[in-house]
Amino acid sequence: MNKQPAMETRVFRVMACVCLLVLMALGAGFYRVISLKIDTPQELISIAIPRNSTITEIATRGSLLDRRGRILAGSRVGYKLFADPEGIKDLEELAFELGEKLQIPPADIERKIRQSSSRRYVVIVDLLEQWQVDLIRESSYKNVGLEARLVRSYPHGNSVASLVGLVGDEHTGLAGLEHSLNNSLDGTTGTIVRLRDSDKDTLWVDPNNYIPKNNGENIQLTIDVVIQEIATSHLQAEVLRCNAGGGRVVVLDPKTGGILAMADILNPRENWTQEVSDPSRDIDPRLGRNRCLTDPYEPGSTFKPFVWSFATELGKATEDEILPTPSGSPHRTTFGRMIRDAHYYGPSTWQKVLIKSMNSGMAIIAERITYEEMRSGITGFGFGSPTYIGLAGETSGIMTSGKNWSPYTQTSVAMGHEIAVTLLQMAQGFCAFARDGSLPQLRLIAQKEPSVPIVKQAITPEIALITRNIMAKVMTEGTGRKSQSDLYDLFGKSGTAQLPRADGKGYFEDRYTASFVAGAPLLDPAVVVVCVIDDPDKKIAHYGGEVAGPVVRDIINDTLEYLGIAPTKLQVATE
């Protein structure tokens, strides 16, 4: 009868002991958790990993494309190879294995890691080739890893260097269009926050912690790579032929204001003083200033068509008016200045003054124009103001202030002296003759809208056409004869200006700036080209018509043929 209660008592005691043991185990476990939280051992800290990790999604920088979609500057994701020296047990063995796999001298790898052994991050190779990336991914090196980085490439080399510019290590534009368009080209990095297990495998990605990357915008330019290479090659050849200090060219579509090409070359020469220099270009050609918009030059006789046209529109002279230009000695102005011509033709028409580039005739008409009319006419063609093309560093040229304007200035400017302009200003101003007298807004960014913003109306359409036709005679009867094309009817003007001394003490007697500006075809102009050859060697050639003129002609010929515009002249058979 007493056996049942005794049994129950024993069961109860066993259960109590088990419960006590479980409670003691739980208590010990809880105590251990608390102790680890309060005083975590260093060994555990060293192997502990965060539950969450962040992955960065690199956004690519937008591409710069030419007018036909060819890449001028583009980005891709590349990889660098890095190591953590702290966890490397056998450096020599690692260096040997990596060197053998990647075809890199093991000694170079070992040296880089040893020199930075105190750091946790050492770059071994700044940019791997794709086959090297694949080999590293197939390997299982614990202390070696890959890091994504952006790579900016410029497929067309230095032909568009100063125009396109350059990016820095952080892919931020430093110069040229890379700098001016940086906000549009630059992308926004994305991030993914993920929950990982002890093997670093992803367990969960919270959609709320995902920020997608935003790649930069691709921008299409008005520049044409083929025309750019045409302009660069012809310019380079002439700079070398005449041993010049440099040269510049702008090729422009006058109908749209789009810049088709812009080239700038320097040619350092030994034992020459006052050479054009660009220290930034010595560091990298893409960091150099773009002299087509930064460095004004004295235009010389290429400036005469502008003064001729607005003087004619003002009624100061008619095309056929005969002016008292001298027959054999310099012309003397009303204030006693002596004006010399390269050749003396005697009394000549106002039209002939432009064709033969007669300084005396320009001075005679300049004295009929008021100072205000002269300055207004010049600024009406855009001189004295930047073109606002959107590139950093553009200057306004140099023009004497109104308070310092004098009779000497008046007659000098009429001949293209005592004034300095940029190539972009000259190209934009010359568009008035290729159009209806209006100036288009110059641009480098292609636009889909057919409308072309007009900056201002410089002269009437009638005067623009008259001036254009007279400049066609410059090519056949005047200073442009050596620059005639066998394919197209050109209209243009040459210029040969003495090189100013850097110290401001006048001009060199035997050093010049040779320039030429022209458009074609005559009846329906599709292109305007301006070329300046800096300080050509006088022993070889120095006149604008024989130095810069042929460059302009050849660029026009090749460009119009490339654009598919049929020749307007019948070619003469040479056989």
Image (cartoon, grey):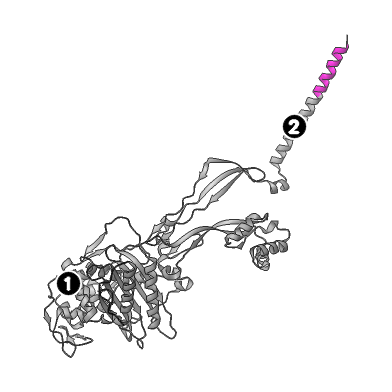
As displayed, is residue 428 above or below residue 12?
below
Q: Amino acid at mark 1?
A: Ile
The residue tagged 2 is 27
Badge 2: how crowded within 10 Å, few (<14), some, or many (20+)? few
Which is nearer the eye, 514 or 529? 529
**Residue 379 percent across, percent down from the top left:** 23, 68
Q: Which label sits on residue 466?
A: 1
Q: How many marks?
A: 2
**Residue contact between numbered discs 2 and 1, judged by CB atoms under 8 Å:** no
As displayed, is residue 8 above or below residue 244?
above
Q: Amino acid at mark 2?
A: Gly
Q: Secondary structure at mark 2?
A: helix
Q: Which residues are magenta?
A: 1-16
**Residue 413 percent across, percent down from the top left:** 23, 77
The quarter in which the N terminus is drawn is top right
Q: Would residue 2 be counted in the magenta stretch?
A: yes
Left or right: where does residue 284 sit relative to residue 333? right
